Image (cartoon, grey):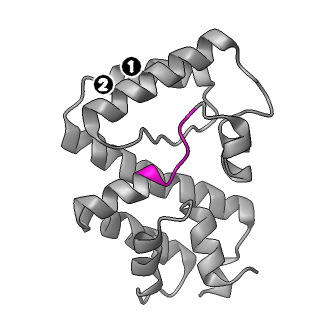
Amino acid sequence: MHSHLEALTTLFEGAPRFVGRLQATEAASWAELLDQAEQIALAMPEDEQIELLDAHPRIGADPATVSALSYGEQGYDRDAGNAELHARLNWLNDEYEQRFGFRFVVFVAGRSRSEIADLIETRLGQARESEKRRGLRDVVAIARSRLAKLAVAPEEGR
């Protein structure tokens, strides 16, 4: 397995201060660590919460700029999309970031990018705090999904 730091960096797209907090925990397994990760993410100072959200690539970002895991999660390998969808996603991401001050992050869970564009649109009407908390929970959901793909056995612990 990669080093613990490498694995955490992969699971959370970098986010150095958050990864540092996770390294300082006393979790006995990856499952316990990810349970703690959600509590830590929701409780830490807002500038660190925003750093964690902004570490994730934009939905619909240039495929050359996203991590290999994000590339698959966002479905670039299944559906390249079209210019109209790219323009819509760019516009919605801009609107979202201007409204909330952080990046839209969602656990894609097999949804197409056009479904996600519709989702961003509905999220624009949400309260900032509840939207931030939803995004942080989804960051951890993404990490859980990635962990399963990386097949890090829980008994390997930390």
Neighbor class of circle 2 (other Cα within 10 Å; few <14, some 14-19, many 20+) is: some
Which residue is depicted at the point 44% across and 50% down?
A: 54
Q: Residue 108 location in percent, x, y?
A: 57, 37
Q: Amino acid at mark 1?
A: Glu
Q: Is residue 80 left or right of residue 29?
A: right
Residue at the disc numbered 1? 121
**Vertical position of residue 110 compared to residue 67: above or below:** above
SS category of the residue bearing label 2:
loop
- State the image quarter where residue 35 is shown: bottom left
Q: Residue 94 location in percent, x, y?
A: 41, 27
Residue at the disc numbered 2? 124
Which residue is depicted at the point 39% across and 79% down?
A: 21
Can residue 24 be found in the magenta stretch?
no
Q: Is residue 68 left or right of residue 107?
A: right
Mark 1 to mark 2 CA distance (whole Å): 5 Å
Which range of residues does the magenta coloring cover? 54-59
Q: Amino acid at mark 2?
A: Leu
Which residue is depicted at the point 72% across and 59% down?
A: 149
Can residue 55 be found in the magenta stretch?
yes
Q: Residue 7 location in percent, x, y?
A: 64, 73
Q: Is residue 149 left or right of residue 43?
A: right
Tell me, yes or no, whether the two marked residues, 1 and 2, touch with CB atoms within 8 Å. Answer: yes
